[in-house]
Amino acid sequence: MSTDTVRTTETAPKVVAEGVRKTFTTRRRGEVVAIESIDLAVQPGEFVSIVGPSGCGKSTFLYIVGGFEKASGGVVTCDGDPITGPGANRGIVFQEFALFPWKNVLSNVTYGLARQGVPRAERLERARELLQTVNLGGIEKLYPKELSGGMKQRVAIARTLAMDPDVLLMDEPFGALDAQTRAVLQIELMEIWQRNRKTVLFVTHSVEEALYLSDRVIVLSDRPSRVKAVIDVPIPRPRDRERLLAHPLYPELHAKIWHLLQNEDVDEDALSGR
Amino acid sequence: MTTRVRPPAGAPTPPATGLPPDGAPSAVTTPGAARRPRALTGLGSMVLWLAVRLYPLVLVVVVWHVLGVRGVLGNQFVMPLPGQVLDQAVVLWQDGTLPEAIAVTLRRVLTAYALAIVVGVSLGVAVGRLPWVRMALRPLMSFFFPTPKVAIYPALLIIFGLGAASKIALGFAEALFPVLLATAAATSQVELRLVWSARSLGVSERGTLWRIVLPSTLPGILTGARISLIGALVGVFLAEMIAGSDGLGQLMVVAYRVLETADMYVAVVTVSLLGFLLDRTFLWTRRRLLVWAPEGEQ
Amino acid sequence: MVAEAPPGPRRRPLELELAPILLPMLSIGAVLALWELAPRLGWVSATSVPPGSEVLVEVGAVFRDPTFFPNLGSSAGRWATGFAIALAIGIPIGIVMGRSKVAFQMFDPILTMTYPVPKAALILIFVLWWGAGDLSRIMIIIMGSLIPIIISSYHGAAGLEPRLLWSARALGTGRAASMLRVVLPGSLPQILSGVRLTIAISIFTLLASELLIRQDGIGAYMFTNLDNGQFLRVWAVSVVIASIGFLLDLLYVLGVRRVLPWLEGDV
């Protein structure tokens, strides 16, 4: 049983959000505060999940970290530099896959490398390697329209990994997949992550998924959202997905997060006393 | 049974009606883009709003005037100034020529349009809901949609002669397809679960048609109907130009032949205004009809 | 119609299998039969509406007429020129409108105002300005084709999934480069759909202009025959033109399928 190096407070955090706030102006309701204030720090090599009620702005927060949306207040930094726009150091994977429909699989994966000016032979080799990593050999020439959901998401992950980003942002990446494919991809993601140890910020609806994948789970409140709680997941790695539910720590962690999501106030003592 | 009727592989589907799928904010379909922003208030914003909406009109008139004065496109015979055209319009209005021409053309347009709507919607519903009708008519629709209906106008002239009937016929031919195709597309995509819910609540097959299918397909039908309205106008006007005895189109052609150029411009402006007003009226009606639709539709 | 497979032995599966082929043939057959019989049985005047078979035979005569193909050629040339120019102008305008609020505010009122104007009305005005030559007719084709092209290009660009753009940015594409690399290909389905529609509209505008300005071209050819009472020939030319319109549309769809294998569905 191996335990991973616990994050030490001496290493500089990779991604820091301070007082991040997001408001929208709608025609009907005027100004709406989606995110009231989010403060968090993600250590390098950490896998952090963000969960919260529907509409709480967790995806929006991810987009702010990605640089696709601008925060209305507060600051997000990556490696100390404030985030001003999208960049290749923060790769993103979407629930809707967002593959370029006019490019075939190989071309999608090599896209970022081509933008970087990597020579053709090298691009192709790297792409093929990555496709093997996500268990997709032999489908290089296919177009996105010919792929299943699971395949598309694997291609999307390969495409993002090709850039070797510092931070991996994942917006409910398995939400559009059926339960089986979802479970398989979670396991594959873990295998990939165990090897490259990227810093991951993972948004999800599924408490179970969060507990399987993450080192820490950040629970957001309902809109206007704040960080309601940060739950450590000290279950040692590598984690066995099938036996996760049987792990002694699991029920308490699950119940804790579940209740945080359900209620506005949680009686912590009552929960742990159970 | 699929919820959506699929074309047989290999046969090209008739093209979309050329306007956006419902729900997409759009140029031309929604005037909302230039709708008054609520953030601004007061007289200044009102002026701004009007300015944005009317600036093309003003621009056209100004450019027209400048070009006319400079004689860029020809002398003032070939290109009368806006002021002169307006004067002539007043003359034609007062001596009755213009009102009569408008009335004649408008009558034909509305007749052609009404016919096109009735035939187009009924046929469209049949095509959308009854697979065998769809299969039977698809090749005919695919053949006739891309063909220029005006190509058969001489044939229509032969059949109907030079009177109103041939003009209404061309207007009908131009107006039929957009609403037919839009209706067929919309009715074939009615959410099957909506229908099942209704049926389980005791609504009959026919009742489902009226209570579920038609209302939920109304946005799509209206999108096609909007194009059809302009199609009817174009068809009738063109027919009147080609072989007219009366109406705005004929006014235009006669003016051309006797070189009453100002009259020509009056005719153009009038038919353009007519088209614009018809379109606006349609949009206004549509907004009333679709009050219940999600915002995207409006 | 909501139908479930009836329980018990499958009833007449063969009929259902053949329906997609039989029904269209039946309907086309019915129309052709009607066209053939109506004049022969005196339901309509045989001079006004010649029987279908005679019209088809006349088509052969049309093709053999030495004046036909030159006329068709000049029409086709005008059409192609006007169409190409409309595409070259309209697609960029539409795309820019779709991505830039300023451009949208600028062009949308113009579009809304010109959309209901029958472009055919402008033909004779153009003749006033530019004479009865090719220029007027090409200009009319451009005018008629611009609006549907701009609108569909706009919708393609405006309706583009933002996550595609975001992905491209996160993969190292700059803002300006995104227009060419993402917006343009991403808008293609809508643009191509609009082009298909514009083919039909532009042919219509071409014909309209030629029926009014009877200098040369297919429309003029038709009208000459009409004036000379050659009704059979008029019908034959109508059939030819209708078929050309249909063929162009078909070739376009098949061409797009071939050239752009990644498209889902037809344009």
Image (cartoon, rainbow, N blue to C red):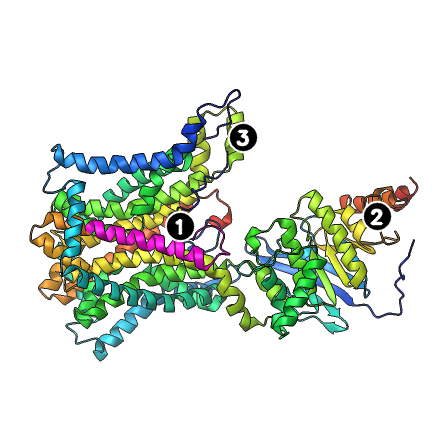
Q: Nearer the viewer, residue B120 or A74?
A: B120
Q: Image point 47% across, 38% down: which residue?
A: B190
Check disc 3: other Cα within 10 Å, few if <14, some if 14-19, many if 20+: few
Q: According to the image, label 2 marks what residue?
A: A240
Q: Where does the magenta region start and end?
A: C238-267
Q: Nearer the viewer, residue B163 or A166?
A: A166
Q: According to the image, label 3 marks what residue?
A: B197
**Is residue B68 visible to us here?**
yes
* Magenta run includes residue A265: no
Q: Is residue C41 above or below residue B181?
A: above
Q: Amino acid at mark 2?
A: Asp
User: Dot 2 falls on which chain?
Assistant: A
Between the C-alphas of marks 3 and 1, the distance is 29 Å
Q: Is residue B201 left or right of residue C93?
A: right
* Mark nearer the N terminus (3 vs 1): 1
Q: Image point 67% across, 44% down: which residue?
A: A178
Between the C-alphas of marks 3 and 2, the distance is 44 Å
Residue at the extreme top: C8
User: Dot 1 falls on which chain?
Assistant: B
Q: Is residue A220 above or below residue B159?
A: below
Residue B104: percent from left, percent from top = 17, 48
In the figure, residue A27 lies in which quadrant? Answer: bottom right
Residue C180: percent from left, percent from top = 51, 69
Check disc 2: other Cα within 10 Å, few if <14, some if 14-19, many if 20+: few
Which of the two marks, 2 or 1, is nearer to us in this view? 2
User: Dot 3 falls on which chain?
Assistant: B
Q: According to the image, label 1 marks what residue?
A: B16
Circle 2 — which element?
A: loop
Q: Amino acid at mark 1?
A: Ala
